[in-house]
Amino acid sequence: MRCAVLFTSLLLLSTIPLSTNVTADNIVIDSDTGITISSSFDNSTEITTLFITVPETDNSSLLDLLRTTNILLYRVASEPSNLSVWTYEFVENFTLCSRLMLNSECSGNTFEMEVTPNFGLVYANYLLATETTPGNSGNTTMLESEWDDWYDNHYIAASYDPMTGEDIASTEEYTSNVVAVENLTASYSDGVTDLTWAYPDSLDMNHSIMIYSHYSPATRENWDSMPKTIVSSSITAGTTSYQINHSGTSVEREIYYSATLLYPTSEDTRFIGSNTLTQPVIEDNVAPVFVGELEAYFNPETSNTIVSWQAGLADGDISVNIYRHEQGLDRIDSSQYLGSVDYSQTSFEIVIPMGEHRQTSYAITLQDSQGNEKLELTESSPVSDPIVETTIGISTVRELTADRNVDGTITISWEDYTNNQGATARIWRSIIGPIESMQDVEELGSTNVSSQQFSYNPVIAADDAWYAVTIEAAWGSEQKSWHDESVVLGVNSLQNPLQESEEMVENTENQIVAQLSTTSGFRGNLTDGSIISLGSLYEGDYILISTSEAVQQITCQGIDGLGTSVSVESDWILTLSANQTEEECIGMISTGDNQIGFTLTWNFIGPSPICEDGSTRPASDGCNSCTCDSGQWVCTEIACTSDDENTADEDNSGDEDSGKQNTATAATVILTIIILALLIYLLVMVRTPEYSEEE
């Protein structure tokens, strides 16, 4: 049973009443003090209005009691069919005057109070008492005879005396039954609010069910004036549940719901039963958001990574979740969850297993008690910069070098200690300075790291160029390939530049020009300090070191080991076979006044491979000046090609004839080169004298 009480006087400002009666000068509040109470029932609103009046008096002791004594209001009712049985119920307690009232204000004070009766037709009376009825203050039914002692001793005013029947002024109260659903409940989970209710029996089905939401409890008295929202007005009669899906909107609130039945001409909004919530439901699909920076640091000494953020949060209803995160994704992968910490913590430690070498970013989210968590990332989301976490040994190449070949090819070499057979070496070039990061660099290409060498021809050769080699591979348990951009000067990044452009040597009258050539087609100049790689040479290939004029000595040392050498004296050309055990020449050209020191290296392959139709000889091996002759590579001034017709004819000749032809051809080429060199020498040394006329 719920009742609404409206005070139209300053009685609303009264303080908490005393729990016991107060007496002064033997003055008590009883039926003789002149307090009156009357009632009136409104059939349209089905509400009874009580009028309570304090007598006009200058008795200050009585007025003090009226300001301090707790008065109890009871409703006593009987059905017309059985006037001998009365049901009484406690309605309200209050003081008849406010503690702040003056005596003049308390004397004659009148105020009104509204009471919502029970359902059905009854005769009701109201009385004021100073103590509770026998037993308890709840609803009680008893016979008239049971009222005798209590009524005589404790009532102070009544609209009707049920014992004597005097001043019969019973109010006829007829309240129709509330037409509404019953036992309305609400629950919220995962963005959906579920409403359920029970349906009354024997209701006409010519109605729809209305669902309202509001931010304060609903009563009959405040319904018309309170703010509310219609959630639905077209739920079919007989339905016992309804869902409200908040997935399309953000909601974060405590809300009440009410359900009514809407008939064509009426809607019962008397919220006396259980068709409205008395406790709100919490609806919350808004995830808390962290605003701040996130940092990650790997400690190689402890093999642990520390993820840290700003000062702890103030909301104890929130936890912090930590995730590994892959760069470039706009959503956190929930399968990469690492753990949670209390809202007051500012860091999280991760143990990196042995054998790992990975590049990792980290992200954190906030999660509230409703389970709301935002995994989508924005520009302001807390994501750390990538860090390298490694618990292995060497992960980069070492001993990086670069050389310029005679034909202008640049060869970059390294030593592979990574022990990762599937690793790819990526080669980088810079013409503005040593490479310490991946900014302002040009990628030349890639190869398997185990090849330990990469060659390329510069499109535009630079006077100074620096190189670096990084690795793209998979390590550890994940076996997910990634590019390790780590560069260390002097390890996998050159500290000193290489000159890609050819050094020009001016041929003056007093300066000797030294040249280098091979029967495989290499050409180039020799200067003091030159270090030249000739690439791959084959059986029958010769190396020729010549000068523009005869010099004192041309020497190659260390060609077959320490202390070995070949040389010529007072000559202008030194010829040596490429088949040397050390595949190296530490050379010196002595002119008497000057010396030119140089170093030559090559890779001796062995017998020249047999030509096949459509094949070409690798550029690094000098194929730009070779052609096929009887199944063998023969060096000429013609570009390397394969003659299908000659090859078809040559296939019919025997192996013995082919071998002889190869030997004769090689000898012919060598002899031709020597003769051409001698002719050049004779043209230089034998000059026509110049004669002048004499008068």
Image: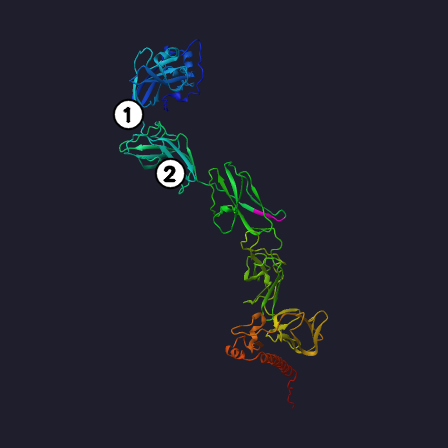
Which numbered marker is on residue 243?
2
Tag 1 residue: 44
Residue for point 63% across, 48% down: 301
- Look at the picture and state if 248 lies above or below 171: below
Between 451 and 608, the one nearer to me in the picture: 608
Between 553 and 506, the one nearer to me in the picture: 553
Give the percent coordinates (x, y) of residue 186: 40, 34
- Look at the picture and state if 35 lies above or below 543: above
The answer to whether any part of residue 127 appears in the image is yes
- Mark 1 residue element: loop
Give the percent coordinates (x, y) of residue 482: 54, 55
The quarter holding residue 65 reads top left
Residue lying furthest top: 26
Amino acid carrying mark 1 in the image:
Ser
Between 35 and 307, the one nearer to me in the picture: 307
For the residues labelled 2 and 1, the Cα–Cα distance comes to 35 Å
Q: Is residue 685 left or right of residue 22?
A: right
Verify whether residue 298 appears in magenta.
yes
Density class for disc 1 (Cα within 10 Å; few <14, some 14-19, many ≥20) is: few
Quadrant (top left, top right, bottom left, bottom right) of the C terminus: bottom right
Q: How many marks?
A: 2
Give the percent coordinates (x, y) of residue 311: 55, 40
Colour scheme employed for the rendering of this structure:
rainbow
Stretch in magenta: 296-300
Residue for point 41% across, 30% down: 279
Which dot, 2 or 1, sits closer to the camera? 2
Q: Is residue 445 left or right of residue 580?
A: left
- Look at the picture and state if 45 lies above or below 59: below
